[in-house]
Image: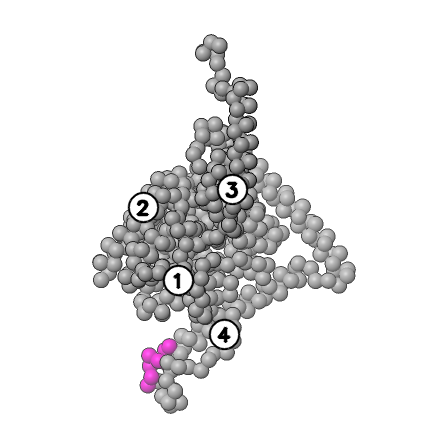
């Protein structure tokens, strides 16, 4: 896109205003006011939904928050298990006798790996 | 008319009528062009998914007939606000292709499209879990201790945080159009973000809709991006290839994911409002990001006409990282031109390749 002097001049004039603190404050006030209106509307919708026994945004978000926290906890536990298994590999003498029969390089699957990362099946193609 | 008092804008009835006829003619021919267009496709290089965690996927790029000669994989981390295929948009506009042709084994993280169930994803999730998970997968699959990391825009800020928290897992760090100092006076976007009540915004919206973000970006240069671009479209309507390129770019611009609410909250507060990379106050989970811990070689690429990440926002990285091997590449172009312009195809892959090749010789 080839710049044109008129457009450049308009952008420069706009930038002179848009970079000022006064503009930034007005921009922030405008967006914040819109958010307050929307929050108030959502509250009304939620109250109405509650009257009809329907779950509102807060309730659903509460469930999502718990899922996110559980996912993080699963990840922490998985890393702890993997770390423990790795240290058993490094120190075979410290491992219990059963581990010598079943090499630690092929450990039994750890529980609850569902939300954790995994190598994906090979898939090719463009978007 | 006395030339001293002539208007600098020469508009007469004749010229107006002539231009109106021209525009009409182009629009009519443009209809024929539009009728011949195929659906817009993006992506130049083949790719395969090699790792996934939820909606986040790691892809390996492939180019038929080209084998990777570089031992250390190169992982690209793009921003959350747009789709990563910008680096591989079409065959003649692909940074990825340039890197593949120079023998690099190129991977990219696709952050996916977050929905409401992802609202509580934090920066720790994005940086340590997803970016870290991708790095760990590459370390395992390539049998290396550390990978080369190329962070772009917000992905560059993520890469800086990751490298600071896990310096032994990053061999060489390349940052491209990456904001570091968010409080420079010429940074319009950062100025606007400082006045936002981001808690109210995220508590109200949950995830931040892509349309909100796009409108914000467009209004940074409203005359160019909302007017001139579309007026200019009339001039290229007769050129099928130019229209296809235009539509491909439009597809990318408006193919934007919503932003996970908690990550957005943390990013705006810590980076835009508190200028945390400069002040050393960024917290990822329960750890503080100290850029002095970034002690691997760093290559910082910025664009001279970048209105989203001005050079002044990117160049302070030099004084903040702990690395003794810091280099810069100044690109003559803008935030988008650095991926798609002809000059970018020449300069960016070659610049990255030369810099990495010199370090791989040192690394052995």
Name above or below for residue B8 compared with residue A22.
above
Closest to the observer, B180 or B5: B5
Name above or below for residue A4 compared with residue A122.
above
Residue shown at the point (57%, 46%) measured from the top left? B212
**Disc ID at residue B60:** 1
Query: On the picture, is A26 further left or further right than B42?
Result: right
| First of labels 3, 1 by sequence position | 3
Residue named by callout 3: B33
Whether residue B204 is in magenta: the answer is: no
Q: Which residues are magenta?
A: A86-93
- Give the foreground label among 3 and 2: 3
**Disc ID at residue B269:** none
**Disc ID at residue A113:** 4
**Secondary element at image label 1:** strand
Report, in whole angstroms, how far the alpha carbon at label 3 lies from the one at label 1. Answer: 36 Å
Q: Write down the chain letter for disc 3.
A: B
The majority secondary structure of the magenta stretch comes to helix
Near mark 3 (Cα within 10 A), the count class, few <14, some 14-19 or many ≥20, is some
Residue named by callout 2: B347
Report, in whole angstroms, how far the alpha carbon at label 4 lies from the one at label 1. Answer: 24 Å
Q: Position of residue A118 (x, y in %)?
A: 45, 70
| First of labels 2, 1 by sequence position | 1
């Amino acid at each position: 896109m080839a710049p044109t002097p008129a457009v450049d001049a308009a952008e420069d004039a706009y930038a002179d205003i848009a970079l000022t603190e006064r503009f930034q404050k007005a921009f922030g006030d405008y967006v914040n006011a819109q958010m307050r209106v929307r929050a108030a509307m959502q509250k009304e919708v939620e109250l109405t939904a509650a009257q009809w026994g329907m779950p509102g945004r807060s309730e659903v978000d509460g469930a999502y928050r718990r899922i996110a926290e559980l996912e993080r906890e699963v990840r922490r536990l998985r890393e702890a298990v993997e770390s423990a298994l790795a240290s058993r590999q490094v120190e075979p003498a410290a491992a219990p006798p059963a581990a010598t029969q079943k090499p630690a390089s092929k450990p039994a699957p750890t529980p609850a790996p569902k939300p954790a990362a995994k190598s994906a099946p090979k898939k090719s193609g463009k978007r | 008319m006395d030339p001293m008092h002539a208007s600098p804008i020469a508009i007469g009835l004749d010229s107006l009528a002539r231009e109106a006829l021209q525009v009409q003619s182009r629009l009519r021919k443009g209809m024929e062009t539009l009728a011949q267009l195929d659906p817009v496709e993006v992506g130049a290089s083949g790719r395969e998914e090699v790792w996934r965690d939820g909606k986040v996927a790691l892809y390996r790029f492939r180019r038929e007939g080209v084998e990777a000669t570089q031992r250390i994989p190169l992982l690209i981390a793009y921003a959350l606000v747009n789709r990563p295929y910008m680096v591989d948009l079409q065959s003649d506009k692909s940074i990825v292709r340039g890197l593949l042709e120079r023998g690099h084994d190129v991977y990219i993280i696709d952050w996916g499209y977050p929905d409401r169930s992802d609202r509580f994803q934090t920066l720790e999730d994005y940086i340590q879990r997803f970016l870290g998970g991708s790095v760990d997968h590459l370390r395992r699959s390539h049998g290396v201790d550390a990978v080369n990391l190329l962070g772009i825009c917000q992905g560059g800020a993520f890469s800086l945080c990751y490298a600071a928290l896990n310096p032994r897992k990053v061999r060489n760090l390349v940052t491209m159009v990456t904001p570091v100092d968010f409080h420079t006076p010429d940074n319009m976007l950062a100025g606007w973000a400082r006045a936002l009540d981001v808690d109210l915004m995220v508590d109200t919206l949950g995830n931040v809709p892509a349309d909100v973000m796009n409108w914000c970006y467009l209004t940074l240069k409203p005359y160019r991006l909302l007017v001139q671009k579309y007026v200019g479209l009339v001039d290229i309507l007769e050129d099928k290839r130019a229209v296809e390129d235009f539509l491909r770019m439009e597809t990318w611009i408006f193919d934007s994911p919503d932003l996970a609410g908690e990550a957005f909250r943390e990013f705006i507060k810590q980076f835009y409002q508190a200028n945390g990379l400069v002040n050393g106050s960024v917290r990822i989970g329960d750890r503080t990001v100290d850029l002095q811990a970034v002690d691997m070689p760093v290559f910082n690429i910025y664009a001279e006409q970048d209105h989203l990440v001005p050079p002044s926002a990117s160049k302070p990285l030099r004084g903040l990282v702990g690395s003794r091997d810091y280099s810069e590449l100044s690109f003559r172009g803008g935030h988008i031109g650095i991926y798609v312009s002809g000059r970018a195809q020449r300069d960016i892959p070659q610049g990255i390749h030369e810099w990495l090749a010199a370090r791989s010789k040192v690394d052995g």
